[in-house]
């Protein structure tokens, strides 16, 4: 959506939606501990950092991902210090879906014990 339009506009091209292909294995799931997650997940590194909720483009990505059976969202503390997690959660709630949200974090001086996570 939005990123495709920006790239095309910068290149002077007419934006076209990418084709939706039936990809073998899209429905495959893997076991991660006690969780069953899709073999393909959604990375949230490029979610907009100026929003915590109510972003139509993010909601569209979440809605389409869920429709394809992809309900695993990969976030990280470094992606806006909680903003991606909040936006992912808000978008899931807005579209009426559910999924698994994983976040990554690193050791920092202010995190002294596991309760600080």
Image (spheres, rainbow, N blue to C red):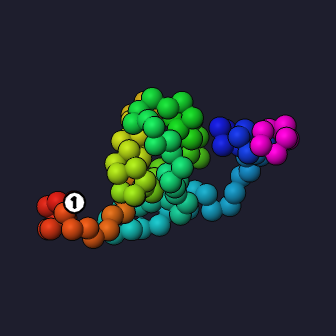
Which residue is rendered at x = 53% and y = 38% of the image? Answer: 58
Is residue 55 in sight in this rendering? yes
**Looking at this rendering, what residue extends furthest in the right direction?**
13
Looking at the rendered image, the quarter that the C terminus falls into is bottom left
> Measured from the top left, where is residue 16 in percent x and y?
80, 39
Between residue 15 and residue 69, name the one nearer to us.
Answer: 15
**What secondary structure is found at the residue carrying circle 1?**
loop
Give the magenta range.
Answer: 9-15
Between residue 64 and residue 81, name the one nearer to us.
Answer: 81
Left or right position of 2 against 51: right
Which residue is rendered at x = 84% and y = 37% of the image? Answer: 14
The picture quadrant where one finds residue 57 is top right
Give neighbour class at mark 1: few <14, some 14-19, many 20+ (Cα, 10 Å). few
| Residue 14 part of the magenta segment | yes
> Measured from the top left, where is residue 19 in percent x and y?
77, 46
Left or right position of 83 against 26: left
> Measured from the top left, where is residue 32 in percent x and y?
39, 68
- Judging by the rendered image, the residue that carries numbered circle 1 is 117
Which residue is rendered at x = 50% and y = 54% of the image? Answer: 45
The picture quadrant where one finds residue 1 is top right
Relative height, residue 113 to residue 90 (above, below): below
Is residue 67 in sight in this rendering? no
> Measured from the top left, where is residue 50 in percent x and y?
45, 37
| Residue 62 part of the magenta segment | no
Left or right position of 22 against 76: right
Which residue is rendered at x = 40% and y = 50% of the image? Answer: 80
């Amino acid at each position: 959506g939005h990123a495709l339009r920006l790239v095309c506009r910068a290149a002077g091209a007419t934006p076209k939606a990418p084709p939706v292909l039936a990809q073998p294995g899209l429905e495959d799931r893997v076991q991660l501990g006690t969780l069953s997650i899709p073999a393909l997940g959604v990375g949230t590194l490029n979610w907009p950092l100026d929003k915590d909720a109510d972003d139509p483009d993010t909601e569209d990505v979440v809605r389409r991902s869920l429709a394809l059976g992809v309900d695993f969202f990969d976030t990280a503390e470094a992606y806006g210090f909680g903003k991606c997690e909040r936006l992912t959660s808000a978008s899931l709630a807005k579209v009426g879906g559910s999924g698994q949200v994983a976040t990554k974090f690193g050791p920092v001086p202010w995190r002294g014990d596991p309760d600080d996570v």
